[in-house]
């Protein structure tokens, strides 16, 4: 096992796309055995979904829909065809949503991220993600098992208890949130405990600002991060090149306009939507609710898959104005009716204790009145429209900006 986990990581992009979309029809056909998927994909011919354009025509599955389905038909809402008895584990992700784990090796796709972080077969890893209810610890543990690495299942214990155990065990790898690793290293220094055996860390679940990374690496631990969710496992990961996060293999990642399923142009910020090709819990166009953007080109590390900029905030910008909810999907509908709009952002503010909304549009000023009429028709709320030059609105994926002061 060299610099790359396997040959998949260095395939030509067109070869990867062909392979993914050759496998996709079979996955969709399998999903139809689950009643909720059968209803959702009624009339869809799996054999016809062989391109990004065809995939983009299928509905996006949002977590709120999954939650509602599971409430009506527990435990999995009809989205899992396999009998519960054939699963390896069942977890709960925030929502709550029940999440099944299949029995396949590296069920959550973590091995590549670990390998890119410098983890190698035989490394002893301390796993400080939680082993209770949620799949965090098991996402990393399944990847470590696939790599042939033993695991010290520490969980998120108290630092004063964990540090002496690590000093005795001498693990070489840390898995967990970055700030807890920093706490452990600080406690070890204060207690004169030797944690110099730690040389690599794969972190997730919290921000890794530059100063925190530098502080950890100054003490000899190389830190890499991955982007993972409880529903999908590892979606993308960092390599030593540290230029964005590389999309995992066996994952089709789209960036769509928030509130829609419509892919945006490369480089534009939008919501991350993932199709996960796996045996245990395949998901088709699952909306993460997270914002990101595709980076152009390929990573200098030699991995050829697409890259994203990393986590850039949340896409769920639904907000209440004058007692009524306004949703990004409604702004998308205004845009659909007015093709002259290049980009739009609804700014919500308050003046004299009254909610105000202004739709900022990159569009000709002559279109303001017509767009305003459509805005009122779609939202049932009055608001003004302000045309601005093309490129004036920030490329941050924000469709609704709530600028009202927080009332304490």
Image (tube, rainbow, N blue to C red):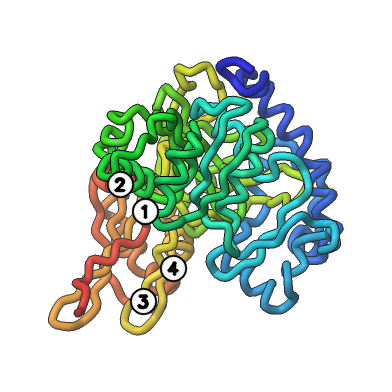
Q: Nearer the viewer, residue 85 or 65?
A: 85
**Cα distance, mark 3 to mark 4?**
9 Å
Mark-to-mark CA distance, 1 and 4: 47 Å
Q: Secondary structure at mark 2?
A: helix
In the image, residue 201 above or below residue 322: above
Q: Residue at x 43, y 39 (%)?
A: 167
Say which quarter of the image contains residue 22: top right
Q: CA distance from mark 3 to mark 2?
A: 45 Å
The image shows residue 184 at horizontal and vertical percentages of: 35, 46
Q: Depth-wise, is mark 2 or mark 4 nearer the camera?
A: 2
152 displayed left or right of 376: right
> Of tags 1 and 4, which is closer to the observer?
1
The reply to whether dot 3 and dot 1 touch (C-beta < 8 Å) is: no
Judged from the image, the secondary structure of the residue bearing numbered disc 1 is helix
Report the quarter where the C terminus lies: bottom left
Relative horizontal placement of residue 76, taking residue 149 as reference (left or right) = right
Mark earlier in primary sequence (3, 2) = 2
Q: Find disc 1 in the rendering and name its residue.
A: 160
Foreground: disc 3 or disc 2: 2
Q: CA distance from mark 2 to mark 4?
A: 46 Å
Image disc number at residue 187: 2
**Residue identified by numbered label 3:** 320
Residue 327 tag number: 4
Q: Where in the figure is residue 61, as x and y percent of width and height?
A: 63, 59
- Tell me the quadrant of the picture where the N terminus can be found: top right
Residue nearer the viewer, 379 or 9: 9
Is 315 situated above or below 112?
Answer: below
Q: Earlier in the sequence, mark 1 or mark 4?
A: 1
Q: Residue at x 79, y 53 (%)?
A: 44
The percent position of residue 3, horizontal first and vertical second, equals 56, 17
């Amino acid at each position: 096992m060299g610099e790359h986990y396997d040959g998949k990581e260095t395939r030509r992009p067109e070869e990867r796309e062909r392979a993914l979309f050759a496998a996709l029809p079979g996955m969709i056909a399998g999903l139809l055995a689950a009643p909720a998927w059968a209803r959702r994909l009624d009339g869809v011919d799996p054999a016809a979904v062989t391109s990004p354009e065809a995939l983009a025509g299928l509905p996006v599955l949002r977590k709120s829909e999954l939650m509602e389905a599971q409430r009506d038909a527990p435990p999995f809402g009809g989205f899992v065809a396999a009998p519960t008895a054939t699963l390896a584990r069942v977890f709960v992700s925030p929502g709550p949503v029940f999440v099944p784990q299949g029995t396949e090796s590296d069920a959550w796709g973590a091995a590549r991220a670990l390998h890119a972080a410098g983890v190698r077969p035989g490394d002893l890893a301390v796993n400080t993600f939680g082993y209770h209810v949620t799949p965090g610890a098991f996402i990393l543990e399944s990847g470590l098992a696939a790599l042939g690495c033993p695991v010290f299942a520490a969980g998120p214990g108290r630092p004063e208890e964990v540090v002496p155990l690590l000093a005795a065990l001498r693990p070489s790898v840390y898995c967990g949130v970055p700030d807890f690793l920093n706490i452990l290293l600080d406690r070890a220094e204060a207690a004169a405990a030797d944690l110099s055996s730690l040389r690599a860390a794969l972190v997730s679940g919290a921000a890794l600002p530059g100063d925190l990374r530098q502080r950890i690496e100054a003490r000899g631990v190389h830190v890499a991060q991955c982007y993972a969710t409880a529903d999908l496992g590892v979606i993308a990961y960092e390599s030593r090149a540290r230029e964005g996060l590389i999309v995992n293999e066996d994952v089709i990642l789209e960036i769509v306009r928030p509130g829609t399923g419509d892919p945006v142009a490369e480089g534009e910020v939008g919501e991350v939507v993932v199709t996960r090709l796996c045996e245990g819990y395949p998901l088709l166009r699952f909306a993460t609710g997270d914002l990101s953007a595709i980076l152009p080109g390929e990573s200098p590390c030699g991995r050829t898959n697409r890259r994203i900029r990393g986590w850039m905030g949340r896409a769920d910008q639904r907000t209440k104005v004058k007692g009524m909810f306004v949703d990004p999907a409604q702004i998308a509908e205004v845009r659909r009716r007015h093709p002259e709009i290049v980009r739009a952002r609804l700014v919500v503010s308050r003046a004299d204790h009254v909610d105000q909304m202004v739709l900022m549009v990159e569009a000709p000023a002559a279109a303001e009145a017509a767009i305003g009429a459509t805005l009122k028709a779609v939202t049932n709320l009055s608001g003004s429209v302000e045309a601005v030059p093309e490129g004036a609105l920030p490329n941050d994926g924000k469709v609704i900006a709530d600028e009202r002061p927080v009332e304490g």
